Amino acid sequence: MLHINAERLLAGLDTLAKIGATSDGGVERLAMSEADMAGRRWFKQRVKEAGLEFHADGAGNLSAVLRCSKPDAKTFLAGSHLDTVPNGGRYDGALGVLAALEALRTIREAGLDLPVHLEAISFTDEEGSVLYLFGSRSLIGELQPEQFQNSRGGERGVLDGMQRLGLSIEGMLGARRDTQSLAGYVELHIEQGARLEEAGTNIGIVTSIVGISDFWLTFTGKANHAGTTPMDRRADALWGASAFVQQASQLVQTEFSPGVMNVGEISAKPGAFNIVPAEVKLSFEFRHGTPEALAQMQDQLLALAEKIAAAYGLGLKIEPAGGYAPALMDERVMAAFEASADDLGLTHTRLLSFAGHDAESLSHVVPSGMIFVPSVAGISHSPREFTHSHDIVHGANVLLNTIVELATKLD
């Protein structure tokens, strides 16, 4: 069994956390910002210090490459992202990138010549400050310029950010890899939840990154005087919308666990103390780990909305608002993670990822897998995000030995 240089990995995480550090102990390296560019420069220097080949593609993805003795060999990828959310934490994304880099460095120092090229990659804008999964979607050819218009930063925001990084639309399109040249992809990440910590388990092996379905639901009733209209004669849109939120929550908990749902935005019109609401519009999202479960959730939840609208004498408008299909991880990769954890004497369990990751993109084209290490109190996307050093080292060692094992099986 190989073991990473724990002191070197932990020191790298500490140093990187100073780039974009906030006053309350967090980190802010928004994609394509000045802090992000500083982090990129640091990573490039780190790659060269490791004696590895540095590469940057047209989407701004940064890589450390360890080539094998076969020039025409496939490439096995491992990584994550260096960008953060506003005032985020020091481990989300950064751990996966630096652990992958440390794995390649350890393999190089051990003198191993594996049958594949190895690449530790940092993907651009996983968090979506400008455009969600910009780098990994570009690499698999899934991102097109017309999608810029629907980005969080708007088309202008994407183009301005690309200009700061010296990127072009032509270069972004040229970042697409031939999927036949790729052997697989693995990613290490903090859990962003408390399941592992509460169970006392070392490693979480992701079975699927959940699919997401988004809808706008608009309940319509009749506006009327709130003082003079008897309660039993009202067509109150907010009553119907409120009943739906409560019953949908109960339905998901009883019928679709561990699936989740959320209503994150709600507006009522006309919006006055003394007027019965005539229209309520709410954002509605639900998530699950398989296409079948997601489809069943959609059927039952939307049927529930229609039933409640009819019961309250309301109209209902249902508008799809996008989403993503579940991303299933590869069984061979999951088994390799389990074997590595067993060899290292670490406990493990299989679980869903309820947040999106770059592995979501790569799973569409190559055998992919992802592991979690415990997050203290389940906190992430926060300055209070924390993972113990021993858990970081455990995860990096599982990643390292899984790369070595899969390099001989997926080449």
Image (tube, rainbow, N blue to C red):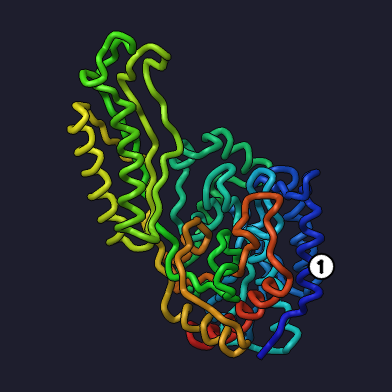
Q: In front here: 321 or 268?
A: 268
- Residue highlighted by disc 1: 11
Specify the quadrant that holds the N terminus: bottom right
Residue type (three-letter) at the residue carrying disc 1:
Ala
**Residue 373, picture quadrant:** bottom right
Instruction: Say if residue 327 shows up in the picture.
Output: yes
Relative placement, left or right, of 400 versus 279 is right
Residue 337 in picture, x, y percent from top left: 53, 80
For disc 1, the neighbor class at 10 Å (few under 14, some 14 to 19, many from 20) is few
Instruction: Tell me the residue at 37%/41% (across/down).
Output: 284
Q: Is residue 401 above or below residue 91?
A: below
Q: How many marks do you count on the picture? A: 1
Residue 130 in picture, x, y percent from top left: 57, 42
Residue 204 in picture, x, y percent from top left: 53, 72
Q: In front here: 55 or 395?
A: 395
Instruction: Tell me the residue at 48%/64% (across/down).
Output: 362
